[in-house]
């Protein structure tokens, strides 16, 4: 599997925020978000071909009980099912961070789904493909039925809520599992967006998530 990076940090987003975790970042994505914060896994995918054994060895080198399989889009990575089964055999808690456009029968304890809104659509020749793929209601329903889940929306503008609410209705999502997170890779920009987004989360009955790793370490790889 092409792996962009494996590192030990804390979960910076969502319901497991603050939990020490090993991150396994697969390289390759079927979407092309304009604001992608890991372009080295999507627009210009980088990484090394690692065997399952090599990945498991690197994960096992850290004293963590939680593993986050992220990307890119980990659900399109070859051997993702075998990798997650092997992680489960080691009694690790597995979070998968996905955009929710693909279903494969992985082993997973928390499906962290981040459906992409139209604020993610890039300009240029990839716009149509991205727009066609980014919201897959049937896949989302399958993922939500099969796994404990959270729905994490990356919000740029308050108007994004006009898109989120119909999406949630369409997939009949549990609103208590919805998390709003500001888009951004700089602390100050996240703080400014976070102030109004927290108010929106309160009024809609959603959770709010910061991007704790960005606040602590900035926009760096491997943290
Ligand atoms: S789905 Fe994630 S990895 Fe893929 S382009 Fe969008 S933000 Fe980047």
Image (tube, rainbow, N blue to C red):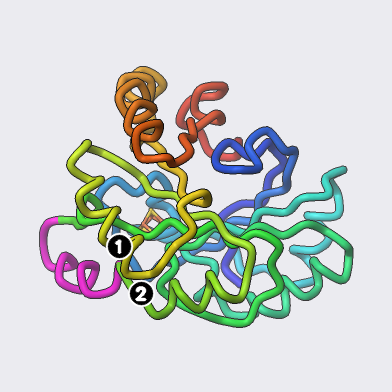
Q: Is residue 44 left or right of residue 52?
A: left
Question: Over which residues does the magenta segment extend?
Answer: 123-134
Residue depicted at 52% across the width and 51% down the height = 177
Q: Nearer the viewer, residue 88 or 109?
A: 109
Relative image position of residue 175 (x, y in whole percent)? 46, 52
Query: Do the CB atoms of the residues marked 2 and 1 lie less than 8 Å apart?
Result: yes
Q: CA distance from mark 2 to mark 1?
A: 8 Å
**Residue hosting label 1:** 167
Is residue 12 in the magenta section? no
Q: Residue at x 44, y 68 (%)?
A: 100
**Looking at the image, in which quadrant does ligand 1 appear?**
bottom left
- Name above or below for residue 174 compared with residue 19: below
Which residue in the protein does label 2 denote? Answer: 137
Measured as percent of width and height from the top left, residue 163 is found at 22, 54
Quadrant housing residue 203: top left
- Among all residues in the image, which is located at the extreme left? 124
- Name the element at disc 2: helix
């Amino acid at each position: 599997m092409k792996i962009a990076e494996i590192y030990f940090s804390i979960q910076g987003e969502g319901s497991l925020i603050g939990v020490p975790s090993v991150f396994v970042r697969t390289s390759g994505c079927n979407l092309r978000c304009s604001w992608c914060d890991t372009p080295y896994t999507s627009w210009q995918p980088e990484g090394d071909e690692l065997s399952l054994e090599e990945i498991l060895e690197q994960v096992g080198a850290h004293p963590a009980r939680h593993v986050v399989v992220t990307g890119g889009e980990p659900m399109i990575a070859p051997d993702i099912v075998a990798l997650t089964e092997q992680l489960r055999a080691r009694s690790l808690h597995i979070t998968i961070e996905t955009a929710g456009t693909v279903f494969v029968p992985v082993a997973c304890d928390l499906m962290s789904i981040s459906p992409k809104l139209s604020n993610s659509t890039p300009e240029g020749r990839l716009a149509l493909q991205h727009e066609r793929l980014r919201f897959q209601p049937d896949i989302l329903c399958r993922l939500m039925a099969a796994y404990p889940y959270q729905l994490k929306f990356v919000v740029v503008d308050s108007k994004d809520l006009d898109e989120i609410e119909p999406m949630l209705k369409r997939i009949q999502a549990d609103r208590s599992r919805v998390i709003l997170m500001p888009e951004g890779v700089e602390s100050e920009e996240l703080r400014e967006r976070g102030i109004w987004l927290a108010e929106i989360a309160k009024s809609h009955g959603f959770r709010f998530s910061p991007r704790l790793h960005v606040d602590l370490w900035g926009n760096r790889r491997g943290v």
